[in-house]
Image (cartoon, rainbow, N blue to C red):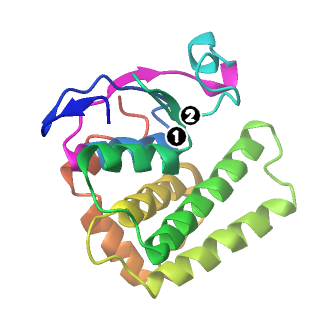
Amino acid sequence: MALFEGGSYEFAMRLYGSPTSPYTRKVRVLALELGLHLDLEWVNPLEDPPSLLAHAPLGRVPVLVTEEGPFFDSRVIADVLCAYTGAAPETPRERCLEALAEGVMDEALAMRMAEVRGQGNAPWLERGWSKIKRALASLESQLPTGFDRPAIGIACALAYVDFRLGARPWRDECPLLADWLKEASGRPSMKATEYGVT
């Protein structure tokens, strides 16, 4: 890659994101775990800020801007960060777990946006919660053994469910997952990126 030579890393990376975005947090946690520094620029994607739209036509966060151009979608950005550091690529099973975690984020975010728009009583919200519960039940049976990309996604997704949908309980049905999240949340990378904390 153009941004580093001979094992000496000289990064010029700017991350556009929101402190309450689970996708942004996932990228930040991964960067910290990989020992990378990202220059952060906080934006509110709901306001379509020009600085974000200049790099992301869809106006979504996170966006990673490097000398090689912008990269968006948290999974793509994760690929870029891992490529820069020479981390091993994910296996198909790991990518599946990462996609499951992203799906939980997607459903939780959709439910949150419905509340913001005054649609908190919409019948389809329960279908979204049912999807989340099925995903968590699946994760309960395949807990991460380390703190790799899928695990980071799972931790950020679960923490986002607590952050935005805290009135909806899930721990009683997934006690092993709840214990795992408690341990994962103690990692420095997770503590440094708590939702709403810049």
Is 36 in the magenta? Answer: yes
Answer yes or no: is residue 194 visible. no
Q: Quadrant of the N terminus?
A: top left
The residue lying at 42 percent from left, 20 percent from top is: 41
The residue lying at 23 percent from left, 38 percent from top is: 36
Q: What element carries label 2?
A: loop
Q: Give the range drawn in magenta.
A: 32-47
Please, is residue 87 above or below residue 57 in the view? below
The residue nearer to you, when weighing 129 against 26, is 26
Classify residue 180 as left or right of residue 101: left
**x, y (%) of residue 56?**
62, 26
Please, is residue 174 above or below residue 154 in the view? below
Amino acid type, label 2 = Val
Answer yes or no: is residue 177 visible. yes
* Dot 1 crowding, Cα within 10 Å, few <14, some 14–19, many 20+: many
Q: Residue 50 lies in what quarter of the image?
A: top right
Please, is residue 72 above or below residue 23 in the view? above
**What's the CA distance linking mark 1 and mark 2?**
8 Å
Q: Which mark is residue 61?
A: 2
Is 194 in the magenta? Answer: no
Amino acid type, label 1 = Ser
**x, y (%) of residue 16?**
48, 26
Q: Quadrant of the C terminus?
A: top left
The residue lying at 58 percent from left, 55 percent from top is: 105
Identify residue for label 1.
21
Contact (Cβ within 8 Å) of mark 1 with mark 2: yes
The residue lying at 38 percent from left, 80 percent from top is: 143
